[in-house]
Image (spheres, rainbow, N blue to C red):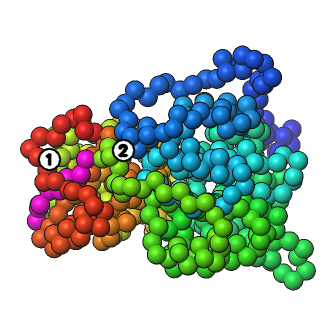
């Protein structure tokens, strides 16, 4: 027996570790009883607010979606469209560009994912949908949602995620396959959209015929950090593209972008109030030296399913993680200076809701779009510097109309900032009571 034959056949060799292919589930969607085959997740009986219940009574089946897509929607646990889904899905299906504003955690990802999946033409073998997001974790999360919803559309290997911090060559190899949807961060996608040399017929990311572009967390993507890459990518796409912008906050910078790229679009604004109705907001007035002691008291008193603690710097994240762990409360931490593999591992483990480690300490890298259904408490260990950051931070709890709790540690230096944010968001942050009613979160 030669060396290679021995290596491949030994118990701990390659053949032993090869994962068996999952058998494809075959379902006859022409069958009248196709809905009986839907494997719905356990019903969520938690209280929901009017943020997601204030609808016109539409049903997903009323949008004339394909049955395989409906199957994925129902198995994902979606029961009825939320207000933003009810307003956005018909517009997108009619081919309109939209500028949509809705609260955090009310179903914006589903609002663009469902119509995009429906409009993908399996006969056209080119990239048809490009989804841009500001963070790597959000890109991975969105790609997973698209794959889950499109489970029965045979698109799993046709959805590619490409973000910074990963191997560029592997992305180029994956883009050479039969790809229909690309999800990623603007910087990496811009690199891939450039031709490698003058003799190349196409760039690795060929979006010459991509007629649908999604900007999720559009306010962040149109900031000075991302705008050059975003506009460069749009230049590569057809002029008659369908452009979909979604966000909870739309600063003044969006107006100039709209005038240039969205002269004709449907505007959807479901932000009569800025903060989520299910999130109770409190502040604790403390000295800087008392913050860790106050955090320890909260851990002992609150019923925490999962919790995110925000700090304003990388050093403070790591230092606080060390202190919290020494107090006997295991926790994860994540920030932008960590390696991508480490970030992915932390993100994955925290999403699994491991009962032994239910706390994550992070910088503002986790303020955008991250959806963790069991997360019920957000603590601003360091008070944020802007109203938009505050809004996105507290929006990590109270997802999809559920109840949540946001607690802010306020020092003497934060008093005026707290008042300014309350005024800007037209909300009230109350002093923390001795006992917090468990039904509030």
- In the picture, measured across the screen, residue 13 lies left or right of residue 323, that is right
Tag 1 secondary structure: helix
Q: Quadrant of residue 54?
A: top left
Front in this rendered view, residue 63 or 78: 63
Q: Main secondary structure of the magenta part?
A: strand
Q: Quadrant of residue 196?
A: bottom right
| Residue shown at the point (72%, 16%) measured from the top left | 33
Query: What numbered label is drawn on residue 107?
Result: none
Residue 177 in magenta stretch: no
Which part of the image, by quadrant, shows the C terminus?
top left
The image shows residue 155 at horizontal and vertical percentages of 75, 43
Query: What numbered label is drawn on residue 297?
Result: 1
Report which residue position mark 2 lands on. Answer: 398
- Residue range in magenta is 280-287
- In the picture, measured across the screen, residue 340 lies left or right of residue 203, that is left
The image shows residue 160 at horizontal and vertical percentages of 71, 54
Front in this rendered view, residue 327 or 383: 383
The image shows residue 4 at horizontal and vertical percentages of 83, 45
Query: Can residue 369 be seen at all in this image of the molecule?
Result: yes
| Residue shown at the point (53%, 26%) measured from the top left | 41
Q: Quadrant of residue 148?
A: top right
Front in this rendered view, residue 19 or 307: 307
**Decide: marks 2, 1 in contact (CB < 8 A)?**
no
Front in this rendered view, residue 34 or 39: 34
Give the alpha-carbon distance from disc 2 to disc 1, as whole Å: 22 Å
């Amino acid at each position: 027996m030669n060396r290679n034959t021995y290596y491949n056949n030994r118990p701990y060799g390659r053949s032993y570790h090869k994962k068996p292919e999952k058998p494809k589930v075959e379902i006859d969607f022409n069958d009248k009883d196709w809905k009986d085959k839907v494997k719905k997740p356990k019903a969520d009986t938690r209280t929901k607010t009017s943020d997601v219940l204030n609808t016109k009574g539409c049903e997903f089946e009323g949008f004339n979606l394909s049955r395989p897509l409906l199957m994925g929607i129902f198995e994902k646990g979606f029961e009825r469209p939320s207000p933003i889904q009810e307003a956005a899905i018909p517009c997108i299906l009619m081919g309109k560009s939209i500028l949509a504003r809705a609260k955090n955690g009310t179903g914006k990802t589903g609002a663009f994912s469902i119509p995009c999946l429906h409009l993908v033409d399996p006969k056209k073998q080119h990239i048809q949908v490009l989804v841009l997001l500001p963070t790597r974790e959000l890109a991975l999360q969105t790609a997973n949602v698209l794959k889950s919803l499109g489970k029965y559309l045979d698109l799993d290997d046709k959805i590619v995620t490409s973000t910074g911090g990963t191997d560029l060559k592997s992305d180029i190899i994956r883009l050479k396959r039969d790809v229909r949807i690309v999800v990623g961060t603007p910087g990496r996608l811009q690199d891939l959209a450039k031709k490698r040399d003058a003799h190349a017929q196409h760039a690795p990311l060929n979006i010459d015929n991509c007629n649908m572009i999604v900007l999720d967390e559009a306010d962040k993507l149109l900031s000075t950090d991302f705008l050059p890459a975003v506009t460069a990518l749009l230049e590569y796409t057809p002029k008659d593209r369908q452009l979909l912008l979604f966000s909870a906050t739309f600063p003044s910078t969006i107006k100039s972008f709209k005038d240039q790229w969205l002269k004709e679009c449907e505007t959807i604004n479901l932000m009569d109030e800025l903060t989520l109705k299910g999130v109770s907001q409190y502040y604790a007035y403390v000295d800087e030296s008392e913050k860790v002691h106050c955090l320890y008291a909260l851990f002992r008193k609150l019923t925490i399913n999962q919790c995110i603690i925000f700090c304003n710097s990388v050093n403070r994240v790591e230092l606080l993680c060390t202190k919290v762990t020494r107090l006997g409360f295991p926790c994860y931490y994540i920030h932008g200076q960590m390696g991508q593999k480490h970030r992915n591992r932390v993100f994955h483990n925290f999403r699994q809701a491991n009962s032994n480690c239910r706390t994550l300490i992070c910088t503002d890298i986790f303020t955008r779009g991250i959806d963790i259904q069991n997360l019920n408490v957000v603590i601003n260990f360091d008070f944020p510097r802007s109203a938009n950051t505050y809004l996105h931070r507290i929006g990590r709890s109270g997802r999809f109309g559920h109840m949540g709790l946001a607690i802010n540690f306020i020092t003497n230096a934060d008093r005026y900032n707290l008042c300014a944010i309350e005024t800007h968001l037209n909300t009230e942050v109350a002093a923390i009571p001795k006992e917090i009613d468990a039904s509030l979160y």
